[in-house]
Image: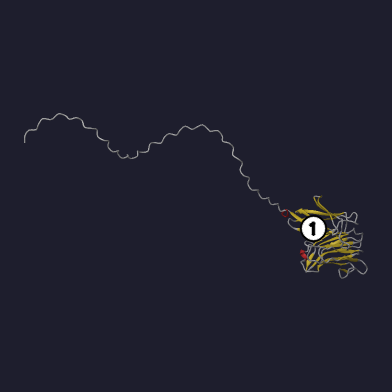
Amino acid sequence: MGPRGNVGPRGFPGAKGDDGRQGRTGLPGSEGAAGKNGVDGRPGFPGPGGKDGARGPSGKDGQAPNLDEFYGTLQGVVRKATDASYVRGATVDVMADKQVIRSAVTAASGKFRFKIPGGEYVVRVSNIPGMDGVVFTEPVDINNMRTEQRTYAVAPPVGPGKLRFVLTWGELPRDLDSHLVTASGCHVWYANKQCPDGEATLDTDVEDSFGPETINIHTLKAGLYKYKVHAFTDGAMEESDAEVTIYGVGKTAVQFHVQHDGKVDDGWWHVTNLRVSDTGKITFEDPE
């Protein structure tokens, strides 16, 4: 092989080549650090007031209190003890601590009715037509939510040497009968309403509850008198609420109640015995 030849002269620069293709998008950079909180802005002006809301539905009326829980009822009738007729125009007062808290005037039926709080009261019957100056009083207990039924038998005062026995009771037994055995041995009751010599009489005989049933002694004699009550119809004597008032023994009437006076035995209530001395002094004795 022969020797390399001498280098030739430099050539002219070549023309500029075309741009190359765009490279691929690079991967996302890592998340930058959190920026600092900005400074608080100034308070804004108050906004306009809101409109009234729609009216809600009406509430239900409140429930009225049940007065029966705090009140009881006293009702009854005023009748004459002498003939059991009804008394019209009498004044019936209910008193507490000597003050009148309720008052009514009886109608032709003799009836009255009061709604009063439970408690202890005194009933006063006055202004009785045909009985000027006669005033009847009696204590009564009223219980809430219960009705007390009373019959008030009124009559003129009895004179010296006389006695009056007045029997009243509740609704049952419907028929109670008064019995009086006098010092002379006369037995006064519905089958024998008058002693032969007029010494004593049964003036009223009520057969439809409440009474009154009245026996009058017109001539008081020395000796022993026995007064008792019999349940003629079905019903317990102990639950009859029977009461006997005796007038003519001193200035104040004497009362006996079936639940705490006398003795009850087999439908009979032996109320009391009365012994009259030769001088007319009356002493009560326990029944046999």
- Identify which residue is drawn at 76% across, 58% down: 147
Numbered circles on residues, count: 1
Determine the image quadrant of residue 240: bottom right
Between 236 and 21, the one lying in front of the other is 21
Residue furthest to the left: 1
Label 1 sits on residue:
75
Quadrant in the picture for the C terminus: bottom right
Determine the image quadrant of residue 192: bottom right
Please tell me how crowded label 1 is: few (under 14), some (14-19), or many (20+) other residues with Cα within 10 Å. Answer: some
Q: Is residue 27 left or right of residue 200?
A: left
Q: The residue tagged with tag 1: helix, strand or loop?
A: strand
The x and y percentages for residue 195 are 91, 68
Between 39 and 161, the one lying in front of the other is 39
What kind of colouring is applied to the model shown? secondary structure
The x and y percentages for residue 100 are 81, 50
Residue furthest to the bottom: 191
The x and y percentages for residue 150 are 80, 59
Q: Is residue 31 left or right of residue 124?
A: left
- Identify which residue is drawn at 79% across, 59% down: 149
Quadrant in the picture for the N terminus: top left
User: What type is the residue that disc 1 sits on?
Assistant: Gln
Between 32 and 217, the one lying in front of the other is 32
The x and y percentages for residue 217 are 90, 64
Residue furthest to the top: 9
Seen in the picture, residue 176 relative to 134 is either above or below; the reply is below
Seen in the picture, residue 1 relative to 163 is either above or below; the reply is above
Determine the image quadrant of residue 82: bottom right
Between 211 and 17, the one lying in front of the other is 17
